[in-house]
Image (cartoon, rainbow, N blue to C red):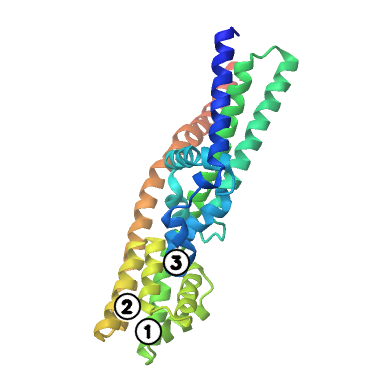
């Protein structure tokens, strides 16, 4: 490097060091109004809790205060690129996983690191056979790591879809059990609690969560709306709206639930017919390209063999 480059580098490092020293002085580290008020508002403000947590995590480090905003911006950009925390939280909730968003991201990045290490190991094994360019090492590690990162996201989406499908299949039976309990004279909450205890499926698990929320003081309507918002199943949303409407207006709910159960079964039959129609077309592929050529071969080969043998 030239003397000018060394001088520029030394000047940048000197300026950064002086800035850090000045920022560490008590006179220049006067807390903001939000930081001073946050400890007194922890019980009523989520922003205050975030402020206190942020201060406890990085407020004592000058380097953290220096590079914290840039790191936060980079983290937000990365989360927007890979789907965001809201999408991951929704799919974790739909999949019934107890893992947090941070835990899932940690697992995802761990799998990415393992994939990159596997890519480097494969590149090293290929080097023993023939020379591999350093750029190929980096590209292989990046591709394998990206595959691991994407695989975690795809597996989470698949688990969420499967669980939502099971809940949709269980809904008609649960709706009929609720209608039966309501017809027997029980209230809405008592019917939900009884059906939740009797059910062993995924929807029963969700109803047990609703009953647990109500038992600690959450209104039944709020607990049901929270469940419907988390699962985002149209049929379940209609069910929740019907229950809330019956609670607010005192309308009979049993007949509505029976009608919803019948509609759900009819919709399920229609979906099965559509799936069967698509599978019927796919079943023609092995029939045309597999069974039909084999049948022709079995029918024609003995005659061709006899003609060639002159028998």
Q: Which residue bears the numbered disc 1?
A: 188
Which residue is at 53% across, 53% downward?
55
How many callouts does the rendering have? 3
Q: Is residue 188 above or below residue 286?
A: below
Find residue 41 and name its label.
3
Quick one: label 3, few (<14), some, or many (20+) residues within 10 Å?
A: few
* 144, 298: nearer the viewer: 144
Task: Give coordinates of residue 25: x percent, y percent.
Answer: 56, 43
Find residue 243 and name its label.
2
Q: Is residue 159 above or below residue 80?
A: below
Which residue is at 48% across, 37% downward?
70
Quick one: label 2, few (<14), some, or many (20+) residues within 10 Å?
A: many
Q: Are marks 2 and 1 in contact (CB under 8 Å)?
A: yes
Q: Quadrant of the N terminus?
A: top right
Mark 3 and mark 2: Cα distance apart in space: 36 Å
Which residue is at 55% across, 49% downward?
59
Q: Nearer the viewer, mark 3 or mark 2?
A: 3
Tell me the element at label 2.
Answer: helix
Quick one: label 1, few (<14), some, or many (20+) residues within 10 Å?
A: many
Tell me the element at label 3.
Answer: loop
Q: Earlier in the sequence, mark 1 or mark 3?
A: 3
* 23, 294: nearer the viewer: 23
* 46, 133: nearer the viewer: 46
Q: Earlier in the sequence, mark 3 or mark 2?
A: 3
Q: Is residue 119 above or below residue 100?
A: above
Q: Earlier in the sequence, mark 2 or mark 1?
A: 1
């Amino acid at each position: 490097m030239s003397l000018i480059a060394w001088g520029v580098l030394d000047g940048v490092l000197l300026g950064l060091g002086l800035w850090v020293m000045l920022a560490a002085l008590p006179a220049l580290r006067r807390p903001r109004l939000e930081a001073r008020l946050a400890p007194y508002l922890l019980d009523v403000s989520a922003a205050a809790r975030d402020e206190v947590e942020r201060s406890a995590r990085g407020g004592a480090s000058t380097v953290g205060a220096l590079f914290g905003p840039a790191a936060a911006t980079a983290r937000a950009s990365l989360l927007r690129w890979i789907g965001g925390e809201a999408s991951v939280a929704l799919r974790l909730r739909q999949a019934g996983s107890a893992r947090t968003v941070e835990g899932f991201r940690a697992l995802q990045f761990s799998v990415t690191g393992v994939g990159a290490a596997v890519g480097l190991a494969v590149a090293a094994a290929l080097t023993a056979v023939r020379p591999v360019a350093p750029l190929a090492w980096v590209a292989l590690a990046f591709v394998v790591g990206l595959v691991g990162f994407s695989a975690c996201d795809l597996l989470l989406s698949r688990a969420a879809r499967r669980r939502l499908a099971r809940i949709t299949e269980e809904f008609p039976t649960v709706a009929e059990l609720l209608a039966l309990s309501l017809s027997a004279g029980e209230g809405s909450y008592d019917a939900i609690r009884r059906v939740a205890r009797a059910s062993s499926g995924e929807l029963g698990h969700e109803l047990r969560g609703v009953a647990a929320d109500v038992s600690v003081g959450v209104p039944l309507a709020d607990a049901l709306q929270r469940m419907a918002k988390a699962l985002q199943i149209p049929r379940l949303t209609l069910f929740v709206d019907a229950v809330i409407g019956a609670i607010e207006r005192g309308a009979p709910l049993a007949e509505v639930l029976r009608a919803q159960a019948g509609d759900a079964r009819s919709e399920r039959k229609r979906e099965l017919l559509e799936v069967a129609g698509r599978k019927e077309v796919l079943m023609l592929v092995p029939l045309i390209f597999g069974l039909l050529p084999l049948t022709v071969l079995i029918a024609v080969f003995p005659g061709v063999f006899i003609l060639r043998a002159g028998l």
